[in-house]
Amino acid sequence: MERRLKPGEEHAGFRVLDLMHEGGMALLYRVCRAEGGEPLVMKLPRLGFGDHPACYVGFETETMLLARLTGPHVPRLVARGETGEGPYLVIELIDGPELSDFFRRAPLPAYEAARLMLPVAEAVHDLHRQDVIHFDLKPANVRFRADGTAVLLDFGLARHGRLPDLAGEEFDRPLGTGAYIAPEQVLGLRSDPRSDLFALGVMLYELATGVLPFGMPTTPSGFRRRLWTDPLPPRRRRPDLPEWYQQITLRCLETEAANRYATAAQLAYDLAHPEQVAIDERGRRLERIGLAARLARWLRLQRAPPRPAAAPSEHLASAPHVLVALDTGAGEALGAALREAVARIVQARPDCLVTCITVFEPSALTQQEDGEEIARGMMTERFMALRHWARPLGLPDARLRYHVLEGTDAAARIAGYAAARHVDHIVIGARGSGSLRRFIGSVSARVAAEAPCTVTVVRPEAHREPPAGATKP
Amino acid sequence: MRIALLSDIHSNLEALQACLAHARRQGAERFGFLGDLVGYGADPCACLDLVIDLVDRGAAAVMGNHDEAALGGLCAEMNIPARDAIYWTRRQLAERHREFLARLPLTASVDGTLLVHASADAPAAWTYVSNEERAQRSLQATEARLTCAGHVHAQHLYYTSPSGGVREHPPEPGVPIPLTRQRRWLALVGSVGQPRDGNPAACYALLDGAADQIVFHRVPYDHFAAARKVIAAGLPERLALRLAQGH
């Protein structure tokens, strides 16, 4: 029989404050170091008589992954080890609100729900970037820090794409929580990061409607139903829900992972910019898909079960967020060279997202009385110029985004935007060698130095200067 | 304490030097040689001199089937090029080399890690640990939390499951894998001198005792030079070709 730790007792060099949570798999205690200091969480697996080996493997998996994960979106691992009574884990205490606290107030207005889920999507993207898929995302497994950053908890069912899948290999039944589990997880596939996007879709649906899209099944046949049926469109339950919200939600809830967002970063982008979401039939539909489509899904499933994907980081590499920084006054030659560079990057990557931005410097002109109107006109002009530039790329609307940023320091704005929106690759034009460049310095050089990702600087053929000493043709 | 584990050097001096240099850059403080120091390649004496020197300074080494064959016998179970290489090797070895090979044990233990050339359940039978069932037999034969072996010339990692049975994880070069304390592990570190997985880069593994993790490494080396020496020594041409092809 397992022993409970008492408040005041010392265990593995930590003093117990109180029992925080008694889960099916583990006991969580609030502790601090024996010498005092900030409160922490000690996790002990339930290893007593009759407890399922899952507790043990889940604990082993979580310890292994927390030792590998870094960054603000996971709790910091403080200590791990074993006493005579079994293994223990001490992690950072995240004492901000739990995501499930907000679900008690559901249904929430669309903008509020999107704002709430945006940091969660960003946290999931950071996890995928570190090659880990969570596989048990639900409101109880997300907490927020004081600055609003989301922290993902409970990695007992998670998988690292390059390490042994300890949790997955132990069980024949699907692993996950009935309400949030993705169809491919039901089939026992544990290699697609987009399974986590399905769980985010369930949460988006629940937040806006107050109802779980697939209920809370507990039987294998209940789990399997989501392989071919889709949920009632949320706008059927809440007619005032905007189309963009339904579009985002149903895209996450697609039965086939390939039809969902390619990355959590792309989902985060749409949650941050609802006005830019391209609406298709998914956003407008008020009925479930027809019986014929459901039957087709079912048949496809019988014939070809989904294939396992590559490691999460390899999947992300196939779906980059490419940022093109355009100077709309720089001329046609540079524009064409940039387009060619972008076309080469997105080639064979149908899941990419391309954002075109330009930085608009409010000039002295807009300080005049009718300045605001003039500025608005100039913004529109630039916005249309971006669209005009992108048209020959031939990318579908859903893969293109446009932004006109305001600011006097273009390089800082571009680099800052890339960091905030999880950009993987910036394409930017080199300035010509005019007097202006000598005066203000090169924007592209500063972006290359300050941006958190790969930067390609493009120089059109005509602008290339021959090396010193070479004769011009 | 970081321990570099090198197996199946097979008289390939270029590959051995490249792996030793790589391991030292990675902070290796000790070395473990998992057998088959000689055979196939053109530099048995130079390789043995290097290994003997490291063993004198604390490295561990165990015997492989080619080391045993180099000491005598008919080698009836070997294929023809392998046997030709062994007969050639016997003519090259000096007395000190033969003495060193003859003294090699079948198994050794370094900080609780078992070193063996082939399978731990019958080290002298030179069984190939080529699947989960064979791996289970090797794991059942020892109490050691980690067994390191070679012989199969490819990198594999096997581990026990709490529900019984043994599973395999294909290791990726350069990715540290935590060896959780709840399981027992069997690492096949691949071959330094004659990789057979289609990639000519040399194989070895680095064990980080403090962090309880193992990293499988691939090290590119001048396999053209090693192949030229095989041909110049009059050894079977096929043994030179496979160094470039990696199989």
Image: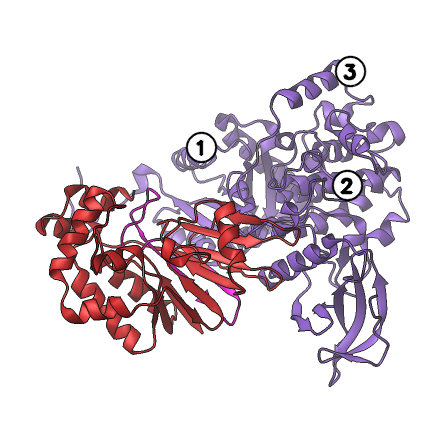
Chain colours: A purple, B red
Query: Which tag is nearer the camera, tag 2 or tag 1?
Result: 2
How many C-alpha atoms fall within 10 Å of the one at disc 1: few (<14), some, or many (≥20)?
Answer: some
Q: Is residue A180 above or below residue B232?
A: above
Q: Chain of mark 3?
A: A
Q: Residue at x 47, y 54 (%)?
A: A447
For the residue pair B142 and B1, the one nearer the viewer reads as: B142
Q: Amino acid at mark 1?
A: Ala
Q: Is residue A93 visible?
A: no
Q: Amino acid at mark 2?
A: Tyr
Residue B204 magenta-drawn?
yes
Q: Are the residues under marks 3 and 1 on the same chain?
A: yes
For label 3, the SS is helix
- Decide: marks 3, 2 in contact (CB < 8 A)? no
Q: Amino acid at mark 3?
A: Leu
How many C-alpha atoms fall within 10 Å of the one at disc 3: few (<14), some, or many (≥20)?
Answer: few
Q: Chain of mark 2?
A: A
Q: Dot 2 corresponds to which residue?
A: A180
Q: Dot 1 corresponds to which residue?
A: A343
Q: Is residue B113 above or below residue A157?
A: below
Question: Residue B49 location in percent, x, y?
Answer: 20, 69
Q: Mark 2 to mark 1: distance in Å?
A: 37 Å
Q: Residue at x 84, y 71 (%)?
A: A4
For label 2, the SS is loop
Query: Which quarter of the rendering shows the C terminus of chain B?
Result: top left
Q: Say left or right for B194 vs A48.
A: left
Q: Chain of mark 1?
A: A
Question: Residue B208 location in percent, x, y?
Answer: 47, 68
| First of labels 3, 2 by sequence position | 2
Q: Dot 3 corresponds to which residue?
A: A291
For label 1, the SS is helix
